[in-house]
Image (cartoon, rainbow, N blue to C red):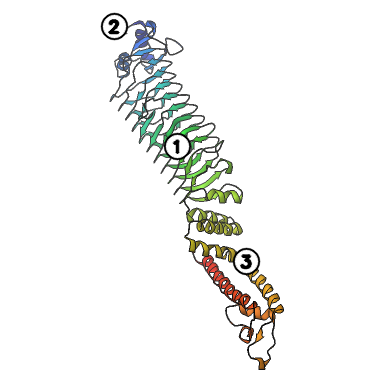
Amino acid sequence: MTQPPGLNDAERRLWAAFPTGTEVVLGDDPPAGPLPERIVRAEVIAKLLLGAGESVPGRVPAVRLRGAYVTGRLSLAGGNVGHELKLSHCRLVEQPDFSNCQTRQLRLSHCRMPGFDGGGLRVDGYLSLSGSRIEGQVRLTRAQISGGLRMNAVTLIEEDPDRWAFYSGSMVVEVGCFVEHSEIVGGMRLTGARLNGGLFMYGTTLRNPGRIALQAQNMIVEDTAEFSRGFTAIGTVRLRSARVNGILSFDGASLDSADPRRMALHASHLQADELLLLPREKIKGRVSLSYSRIALVRDRPETWPDELYLNGLGYETLGDAPFKDRLSWVSRDPQFHLQPYEQLAANYHATGHDDLARKVQLAKLRARRRRLHPVGRTWSLLLDWTVGYGYRPWLAFAWFGALVAFGTVVFSLREPRAIKRDEHPVFHAFAYTLDLLIPIDTFGQQQAFDPVGWSRWVAYALIATGWVLATALIAGVTRVLRPN
């Protein structure tokens, strides 16, 4: 087999193994330095992948290399590669460039490299960087990967705070995106990505404290998005306007914005079939689910953050939580909004808990009262005390009964004088008190008798209280019966 001149021993072995796809093993670990017996020039690998090597009938040519020290830049930018590349336990001195390249299956596993450029890359098969340590940016903007993306047990570090450690936009992965048990320092960008086989980030740590740890705005995930089983985000997880056609899980995760003023989870305008917000500890930082649409929400009260934004959130089913905790759940927004209370009340009503739905409506009006002007606050307080805003009309009857009893006792002790003495009407303290409290003359006692002395002020107070009770009852009942 003809080989080009100038090859070293390792390169000659690789050239000879290419036609049959045999793996060339130069070592078991990435070399610490340029050991002569392990050096392979990147240009030799590129030539083989671009068709310079020969083929053997009945065998599949491929570059499979283990333990090499790859010098120079492995550049296949814009190329059409018809052979598989597998580099394992290799050290690449320069960042490989696969931008705008169309290639077969591509594996750079357990390697060390200063970054990876795959902008516009199209892979017919899967792309694997599993087990590698990458000190620089992984770039996969507009990449299309038909067989899945594997970045398990990867250490990815980008020291420049103005650059993403993992940078992609409009990336399409057909089979699944697996980033498990990895550590990514510098943030991960998946804006506009379409992951048709799901997203799995079990046990992965994203570190970008005080900044965005995961930017996944407008991401679309078919099946499942798993940020669970030990997933940790130090920084903001941003899923604004993302769509998950399956389960979005934070079961056993840790979310810490590293700044209580920042969002730990920004998931407004999200669409998901099911949200499992079940982290292993209390969320540190703010959480927004505003204007999201989620069929089922499952969570735990002990993990809720201090600030939770729920305005506009729509859901069909809520996980089990004590009623008092649900009231706390909808009241954690620093600004008052009606919708979270209305949605919670509708949920209780739909599940047959009408009594709890009324309590939610009552809590809503009490929360609203704290933000009214003094006059409105006073009237609101009066409605609450007298009729429970119409949700507790029995309070009005309780007040009415107490006042009737009080008035009956007072006017039994201090009987009013008859206005027309010659007619000698019969006085009844109970009926007289009712006439004072009811805004219309019912028994004729009020027109026939006039209170005397200090009891006159009691009569005036009962008349005024009767009007207030009647007005509050009408206002409260009207509020309840009026459509939302």
Q: Position of residue 96 (x, y in %)?
A: 34, 21
The amino acid type found where label 3 is placed reads Leu
Q: Looking at this view, is 76 or 69 the one in front?
A: 69
Q: Earlier in the sequence, mark 3 or mark 2?
A: 2
Q: Position of residue 263 (x, y in %)?
A: 45, 40
Q: Nearer the viewer, mark 1 or mark 3?
A: 3
Q: Position of residue 433 (x, y in %)?
A: 65, 78
- Between marks 3 and 2, how big is the CA–CA gap? 99 Å
Q: Secondary structure at mark 1?
A: strand
Q: Earlier in the sequence, mark 1 or mark 3?
A: 1
Q: Secondary structure at mark 2?
A: loop
The answer to whether the residue labelled 1 contacts the one labelled 3, judged by CB atoms less than 8 Å apart, is no
Q: Looking at this view, is 191 or 247 the one in front?
A: 191
- For the view shown, which residue lies furthest in the bottom direction? 422
Residue at 34% of width from left, 27% of height from top? Answer: 118
Q: Nearer the viewer, mark 3 or mark 2?
A: 3
The amino acid type found where label 2 is placed reads Gly
Q: Is residue 412 left or right of residue 380?
A: right
Q: State whether residue 385 appears in this view.
A: yes
Query: Badge 1 is on which residue?
Result: 237
Q: Looking at this view, is 312 or 210 the one in front?
A: 210
Is residue 270 depicted above or below 370 in this figure? Answer: above
The amino acid type found where label 1 is placed reads Val
- Between marks 2 and 1, how big is the CA–CA gap? 51 Å
Q: State whether residue 443 appears in this view.
A: no
Is residue 380 depicted above or below 126 in this figure? Answer: below
Is residue 131 depicted above or below 435 in this figure? Answer: above
Tell me if mark 1 has few (under 14), some (14-19) or many (20+) residues whose alpha carbon lies within 10 angstroms of its own.
Answer: many
Badge number at residue 395: 3
Is residue 418 depicted above or below 49 in this figure? Answer: below
Query: Badge 2 is on which residue?
Result: 6
